[in-house]
Amino acid sequence: MNRAILIVICDFLVSAMLSMMTGMVPAHVGGSGVGLDGRTTALLLSELQNRRQQLEATREKLREAQQKEGFSEAREQMLEKLAGELADTLLKREQLEERLRLTRTNTGALTPEQLQRRLDREIRNRHLNRIRLEEAQSELAALRKNYAFASGNLAKLSEDYAAARQKISDTGERLDETRESLKETQRDLEEQRRRLESTGADLAKTRETLAARETALAGMRESLKETLNRMGEVSRNAQKTESDLAYTRGRLSATERDLAESRSQLERTRRLAAAREVERNEARTRLDQMSKALKSAVTELSRTKASLDVTKQEAENTGRELIATRGEAETTAVKLKSAEERLAEAEQKLRSDVLDRYHEAAMRLDLALTEERLLLNQHGGGVYYLPLVKLGGKNVLVASFHTLAGDLDTPLKFDRILELTYRTRPGDAPEEGTPGVNAAGPLLTVPEEPRIAALEVAPEGRVPLETMTIGKLRQRGLQNLYLFKTSSFGKESAALGGRCSIDLSAREPYLYIRNTGRGTGGNELRAEPGDLVLSREGDFIGVVVAIENFDFGRRQEAKCFVFPDEFSWEKAGSIPIVRRPGEEYFSAFGGAVRRHLEQQVEKTEKGGK
């Protein structure tokens, strides 16, 4: 017969018997109650024992599943149900055993019904308490085990929690600084926009003035042509007048000769007057006519002289006007040439090659670094825009050491590094369709300044910038220098007019940039470690490495390293950026970076930089 069916039948028989018996006594004791023989009792006790073992095994499996898989309301209800069934089974077993032990002499004064109820209640309560005690002890052991495990990780969790809080605090501060920088950049852009509009308006006015002057000069040229034409006509009139005057003079000479002949003839006529009366009258008539002709000639000569004087005066006035006009034309030509020179100079001043050169040389560096931690991995690196620079015979990306090491924005321990990639591509390349090239390194450290590093890369169609050393910078001067942030592709850039200086008494190759004080405004772009400085011609100047505060923080200067004249990579340090075969982490990179940072701290403390 099936064991489950047998258990159910036995359970039913025991329950029926216990509920029907009112004066049960052992089989060997006579009385009015119903008795059980020893074989039936042994069979019932054996089946109850088997059921107890099955219930306990099932309860133990449910308890283990509760511990491994977590708390479940369904399993908890099944445990409670199994505890009740186990208590009932134990109760029935105890009832059978107690009734076998009872006799008429040890039953006491209670009736069989009362005794049975009390016995049932006490046995059930006792087994329930024992089962609950076992469950409580099991839960206590699990809690102790969890407590020991949690105590073992408490120190690491506290450390990671402190690091996370510090990171959140630093991130909040950087976010505030970024917001302030963004506001300053917006104000700077507005100011530059206003300046550009003002410069455009001035340029438009200058062009209008030049156009007006060109128009006036063209009018003067036409007037000069007309004056020259008038002068030619006056010259021709003067020549004609001189010809008329010569003709008049010739006629006057002829008239004078005729008058002399007339006088001679008059003398001869007077001598012959007596003889020739008729001839005398005729001679008088001719004399009168000749006198009239002489008067007419003298009058015409006077009028000719007056006309000649007026013509000479007009010629003199025209000559003076011509000289004045020529002077004005020469003055206007000089002014026009000066205006053209000023316009060319203004256009030269407005023209700058720095943005074009930066655009041709800029490369995008995607630096990805992952450091394994206990709970959450730490990610460093970022996206940076660095110009390709020709330095010491190599084409390199120059930046601050923390930028190329990956901990510029995120604090790292440089231990157990799982991922490290340096991917480069042109700065103006689109996001999609340009996978880039993984640089093989190594990182190069600058012996003169440990806070600067470089990464040698392939040009990839970029035009590298020339490097302006400290000696060339002193010869060139500090005007027209520009500051570029590495976090954007030229968006965060500004001119450093009036903010730069060099300590000529010291031999250190540093350029100082004022962030506060004279020559700066509230909306100026602040120089920070990692920023780059370029010239107007598009030459690479240097990298900002530190910030110095004076007068209790009221005055601040940024320190920019400029490469020396005789720079070489022979003594430069090398940091590998690839993982060795068979290694799980980038151990060589992490160890080299930690050693370099320790040496950097020692050199900074000794040099006081």
Image: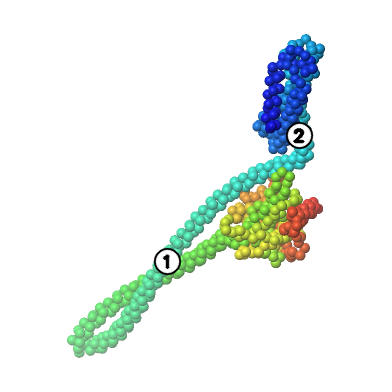
Residue at disc 1, secondary structure? helix
**Residue toward you, 359 or 564:** 359
Question: Residue at 18% across / 86% down in the picture?
Answer: 278
Residue type at the position of mark 2: Ala
Label 1 Cα neighbours within 10 Å, binned few <14 / some 14-19 / many ≥20:
few
**Residue toward you, 409 or 555:** 409
Question: Residue at 38% across / 74% down in the picture?
Answer: 232
Residue type at the position of mark 1: Ala
Question: Residue at 70% across / 19% down in the picture?
Answer: 17
Q: Which mark is residue 142?
A: 2
- Check if mark 2's residue and mark 1's residue have beta carbons within 8 Å: no
Residue at disc 2, secondary structure? helix
Examine the rendered structure and indicate whether residue 346 appears above or below residue 78. Answer: below
Q: Is residue 118 visible?
A: no
Q: How many marks?
A: 2
Q: Quadrant of residue 282?
A: bottom left
- Quadrant location, the N terminus: top right
> In this rendering, which labeled residue sits more in front, label 2 or label 1?
2
Q: Which mark is residue 218?
A: 1
